[in-house]
């Protein structure tokens, strides 16, 4: 850095410098020029007036226009008090100009009262000279005992003249009043205006003598009482929530020296303890357990003798409180083999007591970054294995990662990475900015294998933004050619309208609390001649406490909600008296204990019930489904220390056992007790991972009655994309191996699947895309299948079918013949479906779930939904049998003769046992999207079935062995269940019709980010009209399939079937495939991020067999889906700024699961991505290797993460090793260690001594001290 100082201001009394008019800084390395200007007149001396970012030296080119310019000015009113002149220095405005006054100008202006309080804040944005945003915030104040800055009222408005702070006026967005204690001036009440009730909703506050908040009571009557330590009076040690029906407690303990959190008992009952060093850094984390193990200790032994906590918590933290190890953390000065010194930190994760001491080779993965002087990542490698683990000087080549170029304002200009199938050919994602990011044009250039070209523009689309409350909000998105969707917002950032390229609009209205009141669009409100009355798509009604109490759809069907004071649903009642009742833990642990559906009111018989039990963590230990006949189906779970499912026991007595190497699944087995009381293995699989993608390279499975083993083999590129997948039948020797399926995948530069090559037939299927839509496909030399879309994302041409879309219905014609005719009700739900194969009438229950479909000939198939919204039972008409789905990996098929087939799938475990049962298995193959395409007989490897799908999923099932009738089609397209009679797929939240390429009901997702995607405003469109590269985990949104689905495909390895002989003694082979969760439904396993970033996140399909309270499968995809479904079921209200609580809950659930299985590598990558593209400000290593969340008082203590590279099973016992030894020797069996290193800090041998000299505190034993843990920040 080089600095130039100009126009010094010298004190006339000879007392030194007062400042300079300007300081120019030249970042020599990156050639960036910045000039800061200062006021030089009293009383503004030293305050900045302008900051210019320049393209070149201002002395060489003094006339140049700044790239950006931040300007401010101040008013200096003078008053006199007690004969003294008092100056107030009040900021008048902040102004950010980019590309000059005619570019993008963002300004905030202020006015003040006589005491210097802001009474008006005006925010505006101009683009190209036009005002595109304005808001006014008005405030009033009072004085108590000389304190003059006590705000009494605040309103946010879109109308400049709305300055009456005693009333809510038209054009206001929100209105809040505050009152204070007349003696202490502490806050007493916060009153938020509700235009639903025409009154204020009041929250009261209480404080102690130190100003700590001790109590609050919200409008629903929920009282929160906080108790603080009597000695350290700012540390909260207990928090109690209490009201009728709610009584929960949270306990906390702190280190007496550092004030860091040592222990926390959450309201859920989970107890976590940590050790901290003299710097207040976490060095070990443990969690409460019920069973004493080899490495267990007690809370009394683990915690220091003296700490700050309540007496009740101290009693709990006794020698009877058993703690199991979870993670250890170390911080070291490490000298590499090249002699450079690094600051390193490592995270050692413990998984299971039984693994301690066993060792295998260690598994090391690397991720590397290089940065410019501003901290921008110039290079980010993919996960790598090529370097020795301790070679911190290793520099990957350009083909091993993503290279980024930034402009002088720190914005990404382009990113270059290798293509998937040829690392010598690059993909370039470039971003062009106009109006300083007001408009961003993204262009992706790379290879197109189908055109035999290496440098083709595959995607080019601009997006335009405005800034509201410091956040960028998209106002236009061009996704296909010139097809642009537009969005408008209110002054709080809530979405008001969204228009697709065909001018179909979605509109929203909010109340003064920011909650969604009206939602309207053409998909959830269709034209129905039988109901001509105009009712919005969705109406939301709130009670006097601000809680959602009623929803009404366009069909005038209402759902009522009763809630407790925490807002949790207690009773949900449909228009047909259908009731969903929720019950919670009566011990105050805030855990959902059951959900029960009563089809005709609670006085009548129940239909379905889900009951939940938890262990001490608390993790779901039991999930039981009860049906109307009283029969209960229970699944029981056991976990390791990191929350990975070790065993899963099924209703029929079978058990699924999982084994791991660190966090990687290595073995999965389904077993049961045989007739003689001995353990019988029905099916097992081994998983080998010897690459950096953390995906399996080989999966071998067999057992049961199989006389042969089958092996899946996979090849990936460095970006975790699947390049090939083969399935072989293994023989006695390698020469006896029989190939069954061979697939090779080729991608274009936009990460889209371009070719799917079948190695057995040597036939390729090619896919071409137009932007992000599927354009056409071709198998070998067959005719090309073309797709044409209208501006709204409908498909008027689908191969040989012409589809017309009116307001209602949708009709498909193939030549002169009608291929299908779809009729919808006013709520947009399919009610009549006529195709060439069948004619159906579909009906729904009052919660919007498919209840039945009736053939025109009079036969009806009835569907039973579980309380969580999933279909659990399908009963075919007459004596046609039924299908009972207990979980995604366990179902019972009752055939027409009364016999039953129980299907259990690997690795989503389940098992069955009974005397005389005869298990058998089948081998399956799934493609890169997760579609089950082949079934093979386990005894001899002969082909049972093939399933081919058209581009939108219409199946063609070819049964090679007609005698096999066990295929119940619970796992087919995207591993979803196919209802063959209705020709529909069950996607969880919605059903999908592949013939039309549409869902049968409109999506009710509310997040703007999803609406802004290609065809995102079309609430019936399937996977954004790109079904080749997407998969849908829940029926609500699609994710990248080609990156993530292979994990699920790899884990689709087999199943167990049992026949309960009632007239038939046959033991048919059961169908098997991955559950929706095992698939991770394409994309969470490898998040695809904007601008070329791809952070690979491990999603182990067996990792969370039940971490969610509502489902038996808790992969990240399913957790999102379960959270979303609960949100739907309870009718959670919208929050402000377009983020509803449902979406927030889903995000939290997703991130929690991802962080629980991610390495340090992916944590860092996630933070880089979030910082660069989503405007967050994470430290790169934030969340990696830390035991607790920040914020001891109100923040969550939980959130243990498994951070780090996978150096699994190697070396001596890490427990007894020093930190440096752990870095050098690896780790023990069952452990996982993550190591991160900062840049080289010194080569001098006396660094520890010199660093230690800066640490005056006695008793600190750590060799390095860099700065202080706490400091003072200044805000201007």
Image (cartoon, rainbow, N blue to C red):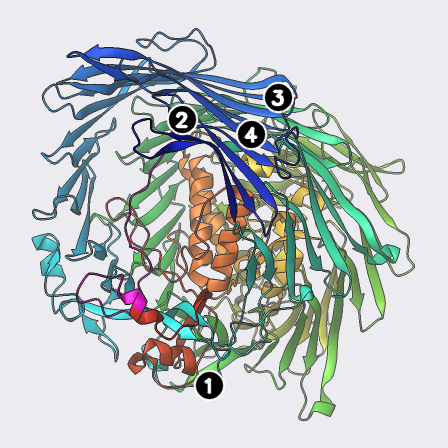
| Foreground of the two, 440 or 539 | 440
Between disc 4 and disc 1, the foreground one is 4
Q: Which residue is mark 3?
A: 101
Disc nearer the start of the sequence (4/1):
4
Q: CA distance from mark 2 to mark 4?
A: 50 Å
Span colored in magenta = 1250-1276
**Mark 4 residue element:** strand
Check whether the beta carbons of the residues at disc 4 and disc 1 lie within 8 A of each other: no
Q: Residues within 10 Å of mark 2 (few under 14, many from 20)?
A: some
| Image coordinates for residue 53, horizontal then vertical, percent | 57, 36
Give the vertical position of 1088 relative to 714 (above or below). above
| Image coordinates for residue 82, horizontal then vertical, percent | 15, 12
Disc nearer the start of the sequence (2/3):
3
Q: Is residue 1036 magenta?
A: no
Type of secondary structure dominating the magenta stretch: loop
Q: Which mark is residue 360?
A: 1
Q: Which residue is mark 2?
A: 550
Disc nearer the start of the sequence (2/1):
1
Quadrant of the drawing holding the C terminus: top left
């Amino acid at each position: 850095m080089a600095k130039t100082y100009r126009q010094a201001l010298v004190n006339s009394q000879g007392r030194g410098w007062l400042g300079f008019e300007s300081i120019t800084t030249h970042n020599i390395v990156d050639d960036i020029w910045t000039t800061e200007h200062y006021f030089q007149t009293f009383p503004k001396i030293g305050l900045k007036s302008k900051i210019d970012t320049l393209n070149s030296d201002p002395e060489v080119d003094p006339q140049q226009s700044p790239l950006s310019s931040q300007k401010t000015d101040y008013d200096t009113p003078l008053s006199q008090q007690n004969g003294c002149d008092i100056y107030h220095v009040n900021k008048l405005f902040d102004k950010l100009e980019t590309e000059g006054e005619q570019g993008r100008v963002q300004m905030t202006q202020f006015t003040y009262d006589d005491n210097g309080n802001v009474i008006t804040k005006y925010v505006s944005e101009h683009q190209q000279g036009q005002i595109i945003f304005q808001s006014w915030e008005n405030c009033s104040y009072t004085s108590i005992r000389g304190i003059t800055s006590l705000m009494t009222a605040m309103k946010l408005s879109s109308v400049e003249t709305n300055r009456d702070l005693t009333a809510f006026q038209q054009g206001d967005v929100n209105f809040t009043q505050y009152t204070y204690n007349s003696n202490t001036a502490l806050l007493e009440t916060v009153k938020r205006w509700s235009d639903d009730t025409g009154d204020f909703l009041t929250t009261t506050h209480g404080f102690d003598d130190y100003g700590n908040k001790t109590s609050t009571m919200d409008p629903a009557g929920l009282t929160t009482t906080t108790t603080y330590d009597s000695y350290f009076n700012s540390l909260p040690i207990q928090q109690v929530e209490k009201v009728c029906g709610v009584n929960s407690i949270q306990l906390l303990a702190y280190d007496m020296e550092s004030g860091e959190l040592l222990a926390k008992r959450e309201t859920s009952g989970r107890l976590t303890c940590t050790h901290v060093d003299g710097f207040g850094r976490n060095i070990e984390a443990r969690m409460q357990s019920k069973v004493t193990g080899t490495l267990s200790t007690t809370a009394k032994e683990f915690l220091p003798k003296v700490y700050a906590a309540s007496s009740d918590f101290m009693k709990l933290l006794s020698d009877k409180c058993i703690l199991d190890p979870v993670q250890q953390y170390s911080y070291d000065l490490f000298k590499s083999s090249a002699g450079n010194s690094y600051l390193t930190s490592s995270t050692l994760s413990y998984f299971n007591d039984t693994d301690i001491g066993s060792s295998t080779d260690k598994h090391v993965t690397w991720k590397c970054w290089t940065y410019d002087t501003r901290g921008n990542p110039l290079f980010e490698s993919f996960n790598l294995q090529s370097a020795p683990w301790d070679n911190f000087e290793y520099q990957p080549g350009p083909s091993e990662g993503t290279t980024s170029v930034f402009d002088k304002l720190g914005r990404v200009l382009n990113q270059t990475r290798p293509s998937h199938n040829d690392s010598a050919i690059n993909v370039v994602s470039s971003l062009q900015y106009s109006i300083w990011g007001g408009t961003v044009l993204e262009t992706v250039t790379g290879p197109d294998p189908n055109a035999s070209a290496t440098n083709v523009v595959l995607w080019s689309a601009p997006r335009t933004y405005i800034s509201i409350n410091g956040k960028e909000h998209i106002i236009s998105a061009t996704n296909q050619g010139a097809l642009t969707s537009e969005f408008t917002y209110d002054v709080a950032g809530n979405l008001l309208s969204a228009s697709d390229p065909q001018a179909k609009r979605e509109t929203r209205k909010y109340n003064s609390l920011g909650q969604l009141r009206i939602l309207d669009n053409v998909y959830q409100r269709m034209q129905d001649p039988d109901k001509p009355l105009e009712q919005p798509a969705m109406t939301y009604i709130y009670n006097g406490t601000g809680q959602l109490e009623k929803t009404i759809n366009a069909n005038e069907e209402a759902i009522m909600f009763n809630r407790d004071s925490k807002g949790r649903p207690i009773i949900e009642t449909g228009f047909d008296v259908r009731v969903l009742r929720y019950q919670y833990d009566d011990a105050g642990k805030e855990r959902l204990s059951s959900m029960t559906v009563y089809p005709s009111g609670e006085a009548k018989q129940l239909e379905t019930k889900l009951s939940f039990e938890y262990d001490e963590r608390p993790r779901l230990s039991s999930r039981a489904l009860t049906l109307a006949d009283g029969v209960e189906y229970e699944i029981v779970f056991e976990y390791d220390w990191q929350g990975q499912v070790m065993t899963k026991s099924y209703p029929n007595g079978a058990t699924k056992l999982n084994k791991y190497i660190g966090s990687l699944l290595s073995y999965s087995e389904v077993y049961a007790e045989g007739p003689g009381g001995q353990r019988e293995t029905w099916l097992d699989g081994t998983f080998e991972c010897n690459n950096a993608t953390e995906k399996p390279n080989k999966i071998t499975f067999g057992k049961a009655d199989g006389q042969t083993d089958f092996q899946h083999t996979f090849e990936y590129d460095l970006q975790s994309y699947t390049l090939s997948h083969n399935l072989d039948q293994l023989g006695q020797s390698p020469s006896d191996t029989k190939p069954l399926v061979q697939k090779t995948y080729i991608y274009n530069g936009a990460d889209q699947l371009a070719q799917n090559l079948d190695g057995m037939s040597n036939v390729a299927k090619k896919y071409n895309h137009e932007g992000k839509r599927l354009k056409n496909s071709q198998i070998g030399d067959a005719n090309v299948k073309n797709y044409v879309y209208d501006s709204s994302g409908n498909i008027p041409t689908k191969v040989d079918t012409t589809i017309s879309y009116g307001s209602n219905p949708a009709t498909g014609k193939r030549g002169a013949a009608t291929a299908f005719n779809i009729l919808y009700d006013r709520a947009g739900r399919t009610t009549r479906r006529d195709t060439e194969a069948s004619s159906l009438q579909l009906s729904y229950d009052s919660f919007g779930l498919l209840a039945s479909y009736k053939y025109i000939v009079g036969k009806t198939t009835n569907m039973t939904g579980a309380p969580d919204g999933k279909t659990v039972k399908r009963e075919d008409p007459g004596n046609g049998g039924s299908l009972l789905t207990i979980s995604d990996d366990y179902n019972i098929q009752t055939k027409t003769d009364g016999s039953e087939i129980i299907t259990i799938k690997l690795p989503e475990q389940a098992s069955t046992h009974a005397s005389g049962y005869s298990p058998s298995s089948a081998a399956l193959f799934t493609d890169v999207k997760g579609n089950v395409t082949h079934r093979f007989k386990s005894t001899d490897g002969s082909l049972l079935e093939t399933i081919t799908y058209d581009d939108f999923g219409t199946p063609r099932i070819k049964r090679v062995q007609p005698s096999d009738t066990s295929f119940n089609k619970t796992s087919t397209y995207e591993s979803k269940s196919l209802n063959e009679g209705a020709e529909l797929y069950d996607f969880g939240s919605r059903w999908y019709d592949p013939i039309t390429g549409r869902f049968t009901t409109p999506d009710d997702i509310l997040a703007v980010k999803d609406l802004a995607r290609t065809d995102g405003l079309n609430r019936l469109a399937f996977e954004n009209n790109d079904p080749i590269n997407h998969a849908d985990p829940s029926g609500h949104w699609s994710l990248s399939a080609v990156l993530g689905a292979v994990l699920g495909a790899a884990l689709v390895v087999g199943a167990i079937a049992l026949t309960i002989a009632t007239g038939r003694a046959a033991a048919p082979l059961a169908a098997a495939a991955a559950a929706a969760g095992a698939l991770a439904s394409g994309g969470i396993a490898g998040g695809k991020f904007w601008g070329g970033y791809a952070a690979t996140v491990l999603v182990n399909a067996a990792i969370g067999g039940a971490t969610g309270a509502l489902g038996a499968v808790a992969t990240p995809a399913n957790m999102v889906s379960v959270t979303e479904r609960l949100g739907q079921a309870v009718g959670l209200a919208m929050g402000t700024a377009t983020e509803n609580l449902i979406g927030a809950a889903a995000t939290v659930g997703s991130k929690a699961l991802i962080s629980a299985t991610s390495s340090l590598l992916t944590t860092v990558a996630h933070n880089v991505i979030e910082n660069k593209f989503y405007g967050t400000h994470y430290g790169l290593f934030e969340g990696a290797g830390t035991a607790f969340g920040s914020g001891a008082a109100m923040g969550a203590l939980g959130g243990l993460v498994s951070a780090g590279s996978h150096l699994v099973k190697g070396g001596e016992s890490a427990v007894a090793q020093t930190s440096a030894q752990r870095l050098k020797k690896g780790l023990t069996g069952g452990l996982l260690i993550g190591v991160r290193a900062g840049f080289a800090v010194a080569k001098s041998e006396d660094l520890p001594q010199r660093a230690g000299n800066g640490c005056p505190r006695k008793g600190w034993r750590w060799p390095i001290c860099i700065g202080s843990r706490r400091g003072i920040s200044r805000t201007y």
